[in-house]
């Protein structure tokens, strides 16, 4: 896990992208924030770049390639799997079947987006702080 790498946010809703952009701006993380509007373009980026992202926040319902399908493709790709990039669902709502399916694909977290800006900021801070402290298989001291 590359703790200094970019934070990837896959979100097709422009308003949610703007809100998440403001949240990360206020939290002052040094990581670049990279947005994708669909899973297909995110997968293209992840497979083509040598840059190792720090964490992926993904919506579930997206055009072209939904979050569950994207997670499956990342998990099936040995190069991406070995990078130990935490993959989290950050979505507006959740059906139980989506939660079960997500965890069956080895997702590292499933979060419902709060509607309140301050709650969202606190949630994002808790998530990122946790992963900054976490040790991964490719950790080098």
Image (spheres, rainbow, N blue to C red):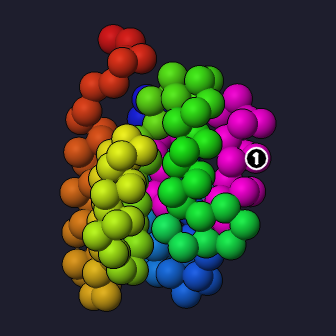
Residue 31 among magenta residues: no
Task: Identify the element where label 1 is drawn.
Answer: helix
Please report the residue visible at 23 percent of the width from the left and 45 percent of the height from the top: 130
Q: Nearer the viewer, residue 93 or 54?
A: 93
Q: Nearer the viewer, residue 81 or 33?
A: 81
Q: Is residue 90 left or right of residue 116?
A: right
The quadrant in which residue 110 appears is bottom left
Please report the residue visible at 61 percent of the width from the left and 42 percent of the height from the top: 73
The quadrant in which residue 27 appears is bottom left
Q: Nearer the viewer, residue 87 or 31?
A: 87
Residue 1: x, y in percent?
Answer: 43, 29
- Mark 1, residues whose alpha carbon is within 10 Å: few (<14), some, or many (≥20)? few
Q: Is residue 65 above or below residue 43?
A: below
Residue 81: x, y in percent?
Answer: 52, 29
Q: Is residue 74 left or right of residue 59?
A: right
Q: Is residue 83 above or below residue 45?
A: above
Classify the position of the C terminus by image quarter: top left
Residue 133: x, y in percent?
Answer: 24, 35
| Residue farthest top in this picture | 141
Q: Which residue is mark 1?
A: 44
The quadrant in which residue 135 appears is top left
Q: Is residue 18 visible?
A: no
Please report the residue visible at 58 percent of the width from the left and 33 percent of the height from the top: 76
Residue 54 among magenta residues: yes
Q: Is residue 128 above or below residue 24?
A: above
Q: Is residue 17 above or below residue 41?
A: below
Residue 68: x, y in percent?
Answer: 51, 57
Q: Which residues are magenta?
A: 35-58
């Amino acid at each position: 896990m590359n703790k200094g790498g970019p934070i990837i946010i896959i979100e097709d809703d422009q308003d949610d992208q703007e809100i998440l952009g403001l949240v990360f701006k206020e939290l002052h993380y040094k990581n670049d924030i990279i947005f994708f509007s669909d899973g297909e373009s995110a997968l293209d980026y992840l497979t083509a770049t040598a840059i190792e992202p720090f964490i992926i926040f993904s919506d579930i319902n997206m055009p072209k390639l939904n979050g569950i399908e994207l997670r499956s493709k990342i998990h099936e790709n040995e190069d991406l799997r070995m990078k130990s990039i935490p993959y989290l669902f950050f979505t507006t709502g959740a059906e139980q079947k989506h939660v079960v399916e997500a965890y069956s694909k080895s997702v590292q977290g499933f979060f419902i987006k709060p509607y309140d800006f301050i709650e969202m900021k606190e949630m994002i801070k808790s998530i990122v702080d946790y992963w900054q402290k976490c040790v991964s298989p490719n950790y080098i001291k």
